[in-house]
Image (tube, rainbow, N blue to C red):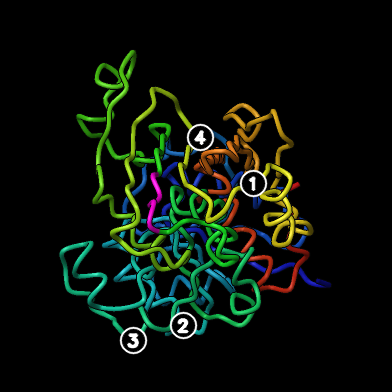
Amino acid sequence: MAKRSRVGIAGFTGYSGRELLRILKRHPDVDPVLLEHRPVADTELPFGETTPRFPFTPEGLRESGAVLVFLATSLEVSLESAPMVLDAGLKCIDLSAAFRLRTRNNYRRWYKIEHPRPDLLTEAVYGLPEYFRQVVKVARLVANPGCYPTAANLSLRPLIVEAALDRAAGVVCDAKSGVSGAGRKPALKTHFCEVTENFSAYGVLFHRHVPEVLLTSDVEEQELSFSAQLLPLHRGILETIYVRTARPMTHAELTAVYEKYYRDEPFVRLYPAGRLPDLAQVRQTNFCGIGMTVDPDTRRVAIVAAIDNLVKGAAGQAVQNMNLLLGCEETTALL
């Protein structure tokens, strides 16, 4: 890109918004601006932060000069704000779940509310670049994937597309996340005294991220058992996914299936036999590490996937999508 583009961040005081600002400030092709959608105290960002601020209104968007807006906001705010961004002629990347589920019925089933803009729900592109980068490039509205589904879909989709799994045996996804995945708004369940020296399950079987796995990896609901658990950590997601192969397969044969899809993917790292990813290896990176343990005799496979929930699970993937939308090199500011 010859000219630097301005990009706006709404929700810049949250964990994902702050991560966006951190990444974008080192991006050589864009200049971030902050869009204030509610009163913000001067102490919400580090003292001396000089990134320009504008009100998050139609007038503020025009004044900001932004060509694209990130919504690092709650679902409710994104539902109200995305139409305003699009009506202003700007591209929009939404980090909430407001536009991920494609149909009004899916939305009603999993989020228990009527979606106010089913037209945008249909239009939105699911921003998992490893599979949908060509449609992301021409989109107006990108629904950034959830953190849990990012790791799960990158782990499962190659095996399902290649018919490598015994579908009747089901898929068990045991997923664990750091506390920042719950957002910055105070809540009892994420209070320090509730989380420290503790480990708890939530959203078992019916977590709101489940439909993103069903829709993206073409898994049937009755096949998938998903459990989410809260780790006493700031950031990171580690998922252990249990499946059976359709026939006895070695580690090398399964790795060949993944390499078909990820050989040229800059942010997916496949681990050799005998090694598995952990959170320390992906912390503050946009990588997804995938490793597995294979038992050909019983056809059992345990897949382990690790990401940073604030980077590949949120802000980093959003910047990856922005790079595609603006014609930048996809890895810019992320490697």
Please state the horizontal and vertical placement of residue 235, each as a whole percent of the image.
Answer: 48, 32
Q: Earlier along the polypeptide chain: callout 4 or callout 2?
A: 2
| Amino acid of disc 3 | Asp
Residue for badge 2:
88
- In the picture of the structure, the residue carrying the numbered disc 3 is 119
Q: Is residue 308 visible?
A: no
* Amino acid on which disc 1 is placed: Asn
Residue under the image location 64 percent in, 48 percent down: 249
Secondary structure under tag 2 reads loop
- Where, by quadrant of the figure, is residue 163 drawn? bottom right
Q: CA distance from mark 1 to mark 2?
A: 30 Å
Residue 170: within the magenta? yes
Q: Nearer the viewer, mark 4 or mark 3?
A: 4
Residue farthest front in this picture = 297
Q: Which residues are magenta?
A: 168-172
At label 1, counting other C-alpha atoms closer than 10 Å, the crowd grade (few under 14, some 14-19, many 20 or more) is many
For the residues labelled 3 and 2, the Cα–Cα distance comes to 17 Å
Q: Residue furthest right?
A: 2
Label of residue 80 in the image: none
Of circles 3 and 2, the one toward us is 3
The answer for how far apart the CA atoms under marks 4 and 1 are is 11 Å
Q: Nearer the viewer, mark 1 or mark 2?
A: 1
Q: What is the secondary structure assignment of the residue under circle 4?
A: loop
Determine crowd level at label 3: few under 14, some 14-19, many 20+ residues with C-alpha closer than 10 A.
few
- Which of the two discs, 1 and 2, labels the residue nearer the N terminus? 2
Q: Amino acid at mark 4?
A: Gly
Relative image position of residue 156 (x, y in whole percent): 52, 55
Q: Is residue 168 above or below residue 22?
A: below
| Residue at numbered disc 4 | 236
Outermost residue to the top: 197
The amino acid sitting under disc 2 is Ala
Residue at 54% x, 69% y is 64
